[in-house]
Amino acid sequence: MSTLNGFGTMFYGWKHLANQPSTATKWLTAFYIPIIPLGRYELIVHTNFARESTQIRSTLVGVVASQQNRFEILGKTSLHWPEILMTYTKTFIVLPLLMFAPLLIMFLLSRLGWWPRYKTSQDMPIWLNVVLVIFAAGQLIGALYWPIWAIRKSRGMHIDNKPNSKSKKASVDRRSVEHHM
């Protein structure tokens, strides 16, 4: 499993249970956005997310950052439709709302007439200019932060940042390595 600039296949919809294998749905992705569910798998996570590093290298087309996740795939299970619906909801409703909520709030305030209007920018008080600059910076940070947060969550990170160590295999089957660039 691999992605190149978000195009490929990824696991989403992770369920981690104590002392049991994890489950996740394999998705066909574009720009890291899950498009089509391909199957649900039972697996053991071998990636230690607390000690993970990102490899950065230069290529002809620019700088590439990559990470590898290691899994032991135990088997395929049936698709879990509530989880698929939840993945679509988080991807196409919740994430865009988190990214663009400040703009939506400004739009609603201006439509309701609660946003002050000035003839020129010199008429605007300094405090409002400061608020708008802070707002713009917050909007930019939010537009970058929320997608990165969602991608990191989708990679199967555990809350306690410890890998599921039920199996102590030294080698991992090639089909169980997920590579993101």
Image (spheres, rainbow, N blue to C red):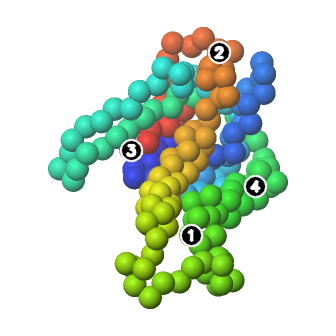
Cα distance in 3D space between marks 1 and 4: 25 Å
Q: Residues within 10 Å of mark 4 (few under 14, many from 20)?
A: few
Image-quadrant location for residue 126: bottom left
Relative image position of residue 51 (x, y in whole percent): 48, 20
Indicate which disc residue 86 carries.
Answer: 4
Relative image position of residue 157 (x, y in whole percent): 61, 32
Name which residue type carries label 4: Met
Relative image position of residue 171 (x, y in whole percent): 49, 17
Name which residue type carries label 3: Met
Cα distance in 3D space between marks 3 and 2: 26 Å
- Which badge, 3 or 2, comes first in the chain's sequence? 2
Tell me the mark number nearer the camera, choosing from 2 and 4: 4
Which residue is under mark 2? 165
Image-quadrant location for residue 111: bottom right
Is 104 on the left-hand or right-hand side of 23?
left
Q: Is residue 115 above or below residue 96?
A: below
Name which residue type carries label 2: Ser
Examine the rendering and report whether any part of residue 9 can be seen. no
Which residue is under mark 1? 103
Q: Residues within 10 Å of mark 1 (few under 14, many from 20)?
A: some
Instruction: Give 139 or 163, whichever is nearer the viewer.
Output: 139
- Which badge, 1 or 2, comes first in the chain's sequence? 1
Secondary structure of the residue carrying tag 4 is: helix
Q: Residues within 10 Å of mark 2 (few under 14, many from 20)?
A: some
Q: Are marks 4 and 3 in contact (CB under 8 Å)?
A: no
Name which residue type carries label 1: Leu
